[in-house]
Image (cartoon, helix red, strand yellow):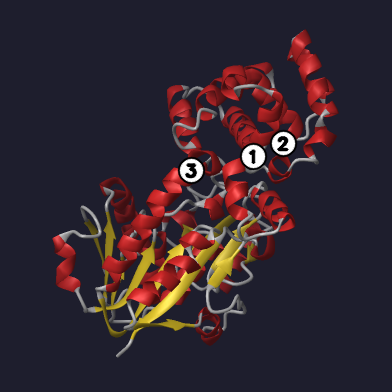
């Protein structure tokens, strides 16, 4: 870190720490506007900005309105989040900043006495989690999602087998390993840039967290079936399902965002998939959906959610969500699940998933749905994965957490319409 990089980091944090926009959007826009910044500069700026997000509770305990004191927030992130010594920064520290960082170091023990600074979670979320978890579980969760995530990719089975591709990659990336659960996944702990790698460009590899890959395994789509990805987004799971079906049958990829679906189209081409039909819908009640009522073999509802299972990648989400946004999401999830369920044929499968750890968004939604829809019954996620030789059993639901499984936090339930 040098003075030039520090100044840019402070400018990024002035905007990022207001939490008005997603952090990745803030930093992407900044780099577009400062295109002369080199790769090393961008790395240092981004690492420090995200360290400030991961240690925001401690920084906010020291600084009033951190976004208004963004340079000091950046310095605190270097010491608290990136392990810098004050002496390493002394060449460009002003006198009051030297004193400030000395105070940061002195107060480190104080942070261990408060749950929000130990877990690095805002008060609203701690209050919500305390309904379900002990404080020790909250600490474990907070610490696990404060770590940076590895890079997980999925091998496109239309273009290669994992063992062969992994062996090839290990010549170039010795730290690459097979994911422990997902049968087509490869993990890079050191997160190399793969976006220009030949195996990425030719569609052999797709970036996808291992937990997300497992959701596609629960869908269990077969060749020739009709599948609906009801909230497809940019299509990571859609692509995994397409490969699972060996490019046979048909997948409808619905989403309300034209921009997200536009991102899916070049990925489909790269992956060699022609069995996907992306379609923008106005809402879950769009009349164009009615043509598929009772016809789909599999329907995946990867519901809009708080995203609190993805805090390793999106640490700003815990500050951009609130009890009010959560209440709105819960209603939206219920409505989407109900609408999507109408597409499932007799004997067909409905998979509900979120990347949240909150029971309100997860098992509570399934219990409510089944009370109102007795024509559906539960299937055991552990049994479904075992049948595919996936050595993972979290019970009737799939419940993944970062501390235990090394994935993002995911929830899934599999339901079947009675024949």
Position above or below: 407 against 418: above
- How many other residues sit within 10 Å of disc 2, few (<14), some (14-19) or many (≥20)? many
Q: Circle 2 sits in a helix, a strand or a loop, which is it?
A: loop
Sequence-wise first label, 2 or 1: 1
The residue under the point 57% across, 51% down is 128
Q: Residue 131 or 60: which is nearer the viewer?
A: 131
The residue under the point 79% across, 15% down is 98
Sequence-wise first label, 3 or 1: 1
Is the residue under label 1 in contact with that under label 2 (CB below 8 Å)?
Answer: yes
The reply to whether residue 25 is in sight is yes
x and y percentages locating residue 287 in the rendered image: 14, 62
Q: Circle 3 sits in a helix, a strand or a loop, which is it?
A: loop
Position above or below: 284 against 17: below
The residue under the point 42% across, 50% down is 327
- How many other residues sit within 10 Å of disc 3, few (<14), some (14-19) or many (≥20)? some
Q: Residue 319 or 32: which is nearer the viewer?
A: 319
Q: Which residue is mark 1?
A: 54
Position above or below: 411 against 144: below
Q: Residue 401 or 187: which is nearer the viewer?
A: 401
Q: Residue 218 or 2: which is nearer the viewer?
A: 218
Give the spatial CA distance, label 3 vs label 1. Answer: 15 Å
Give residue 81's mark. 2
Q: Which residue is mark 3?
A: 321
Q: Is residue 67 left or right of residue 109?
A: left
């Amino acid at each position: 870190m040098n003075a030039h990089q520090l100044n840019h980091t402070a400018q990024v944090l002035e905007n990022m720490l207001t939490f008005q926009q997603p952090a990745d959007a803030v930093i992407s826009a900044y780099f577009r506007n400062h295109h002369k910044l080199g790769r090393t500069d961008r790395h240092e700026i981004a690492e420090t900005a995200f360290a400030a997000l991961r240690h925001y509770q401690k920084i906010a305990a020291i600084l009033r309105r951190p976004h208004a004191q963004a340079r000091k927030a950046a310095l605190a992130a270097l010491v608290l989040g990136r392990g810098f010594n004050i002496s390493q920064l002394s060449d460009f520290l002003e006198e009051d900043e030297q004193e400030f960082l000395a105070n940061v170091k002195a107060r480190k023990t104080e942070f261990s006495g408060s749950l929000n600074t130990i877990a690095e979670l805002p008060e609203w979320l701690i209050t919500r989690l305390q309904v379900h978890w002990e404080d020790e579980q909250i600490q474990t969760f907070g610490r696990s999602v404060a770590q940076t995530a590895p890079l997980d990719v999925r091998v496109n089975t239309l273009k290669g087998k994992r063992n062969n591709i992994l062996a090839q990659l290990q010549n170039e990336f010795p730290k690459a390993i097979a994911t422990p659960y997902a049968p087509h996944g490869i993990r890079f702990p050191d997160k190399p840039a793969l976006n220009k790698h030949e195996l990425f460009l030719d569609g052999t590899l797709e970036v996808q967290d291992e937990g997300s890959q497992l959701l596609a395994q629960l869908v269990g789509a077969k060749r020739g079936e009709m599948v609906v990805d009801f909230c497809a987004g940019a299509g990571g799971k859609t692509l995994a399902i397409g490969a699972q079906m060996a490019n046979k049958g048909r997948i409808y990829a619905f989403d309300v965002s034209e921009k997200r679906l536009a991102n899916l189209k070049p990925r489909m081409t790269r992956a060699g998939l022609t069995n996907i039909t992306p379609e923008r819908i106005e809402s879950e009640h769009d009349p164009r959906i009615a043509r598929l009522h009772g016809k789909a073999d599999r329907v995946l509802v990867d519901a809009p959610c708080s995203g609190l299972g993805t805090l390793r990648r999106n640490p700003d989400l815990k500050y951009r969500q609130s009890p009010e946004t959560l209440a709105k999401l819960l209603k939206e999830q219920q409505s989407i699940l109900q609408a999507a369920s109408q597409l499932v044929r007799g004997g067909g499968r409905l998979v509900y998933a979120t990347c949240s750890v909150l029971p309100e968004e997860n098992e509570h939604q399934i219990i409510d749905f089944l009370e109102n829809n007795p024509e559906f019954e539960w299937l055991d996620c552990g049994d479904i994965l075992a049948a595919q030789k996936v050595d993972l059993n979290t019970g009737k639901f799939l419940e993944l957490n970062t501390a235990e499984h090394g994935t993002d936090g995911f929830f899934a339930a599999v339901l079947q319409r009675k024949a």
